[in-house]
Image: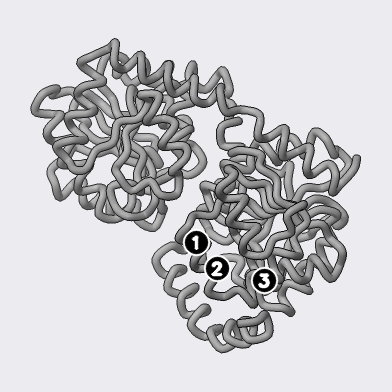
Amino acid sequence: MNRFLYSLLLHLALPLIVLRLLWRAWRAPAYARRIAERFACGLPPLRPGGIWVHAVSVGESIAAAPLVRQLQARYPDLPVTVTCMTATGSERIRALFGDSVQHCYLPYDLPWAARRFLRRLQPRLAIIMETELWPNHVHQCALRSIPLALANARLSERSARGYARFAKLTAPMLAELSLIAVQTEAEAQRFRSLGARADCVQVTGSIKYDLSIAAELPQRAAALRQQWGAAQRPLWIAASTHAGEDEIVLAAHRQLLAQQADALLILVPRHPERFNGVLELCQREGFATRRRSRGEAPDADTQVLLGDTMGELLFLYALADSAFVGGSLVPNGGHNLLEPAALGLPVLAGPHLFNFLEIAAQLRAAGALLEVRDAGELAGAVARVWQQPAVAQQMRDAGREVLQRNQGALQRLLDGLARLCPR
């Protein structure tokens, strides 16, 4: 399938795309706003001639944050524009960068929308985070001689097989990229075999290891726990949970409450459209629940605090004694395990970590990660780190050591980008 046929099929699918967008807008009102941006219409005022960074959703936005800040420091005269595809990603970009960056949704990968978007933005350098590849956007950059880098790139064996089935579309697209900064040598080889130019593929490692935590964050979290009267309460967090996981987490928490009656769980669903549903689930299951979004401080009777806010997941992690990272008890692939590790938390996760295989392997080998399969194992793991301080401390130290050992990818990536966009 070549790019012409791909574009034709995309146009034929437009009614379905619009219906899906309307359905998402019904479930999450934030999707109803700025719909025109998805077709490169009604774009906000954008200063042209800068650097464009695309981070599809929340995870990529967080990973991009250190890169964006370094680009702002290195190129202070160039505007930085950060795009995404989801409402949650947009919220996170605003929370991370405020007005220091330009922001809009990336238009759908329609040739005319890509042309209109790039005519407005006219970037000197384009950067796509991880593996969010859109043939028409890539091709329009190539037509305008805009260097385009794929940063922190990931490509699993499964994804590589999928791309290989559409080689006539994939190979020309990859050949138009100026830099592919991959996390591992195995991924580098997969990109080369799919058609990327060998001299454009560079192993830099994962910039997610270059996460830095503001010194005031743990201090602010400790002060809030003290304010809640919860400094001595056993407190754990289940973060970025997906449908099907909340029930398991709550079942585990019920077991923990039988052992520690004052145990407190911070439950943070991944997607905001699920906040109300998860609240109803907590109440239906009989848990005394408060909502973070309403500023409701947990009292001595509170059993669950629902983390139904945007842009403060790191702060919620900092409040906890241990962290379960969601998307892993269901086959979603998991989420960023390094955020709680960077905060010195023992990290727990389910078995489905295929989006973070290398990171999970390193944390597991170091003894910083406990993997669980069900509610009983989850409750047992949380109880273990509560009841065995030496184990908890060993996991904290091991997690931080893994981060320190793997840092440097951001500098290698910036060096590669500097060759595409000299100061």
**160 or 281: which is nearer to us?**
160
Marks 2 and 3, how far apart in space? 12 Å
The kind of residue on which mark 2 rests is: Tyr
Disc 2 crowd rating (10 Å Cα; few below 14, some 14-19, many 20+) is: some
Q: Is residue 57 left or right of residue 200?
A: left
Q: Which mark is residue 163?
A: 2
Which mark is nearer the camera, 2 or 3? 2
Q: Position of residue 330 (x, y in %)?
A: 29, 52
Q: Are marks 1 and 2 in contact (CB under 8 Å)?
A: yes
- Please, what secondary structure does the residue beneath circle 2 have? helix
For label 3, the SS is: helix
> Within 10 angstroms of label 3, few (less than 14), some, or many (20 or more) residues?
many
The spot of residue 231 in percent (x, y) is 32, 15
Sequence-earlier tag: 2 or 3: 3
Mark seen at residue 159: 1
Q: Is residue 93 visible?
A: yes
Location of residue 341 by image quarter: top left
Question: Residue sitting at 85 percent across and 44 percent down?
Answer: 419
Q: Amino acid at mark 1?
A: Ser
| Residues tagged 2 and 3 counted as in contact (Cβ below 8 A) | no
Q: Which is more toward the observer, 112 or 269?
A: 112
**Residue labelled with disc 3:** 135
Q: Amino acid at mark 3?
A: Pro
On the rendered structure, is 405 left or right of 340? right
Q: How many marks?
A: 3
Which tag, 3 or 1, sits closer to the chain's start? 3
Of circles 3 and 1, which is in front? 1
> Image height check: is 94 above or below 359?
below
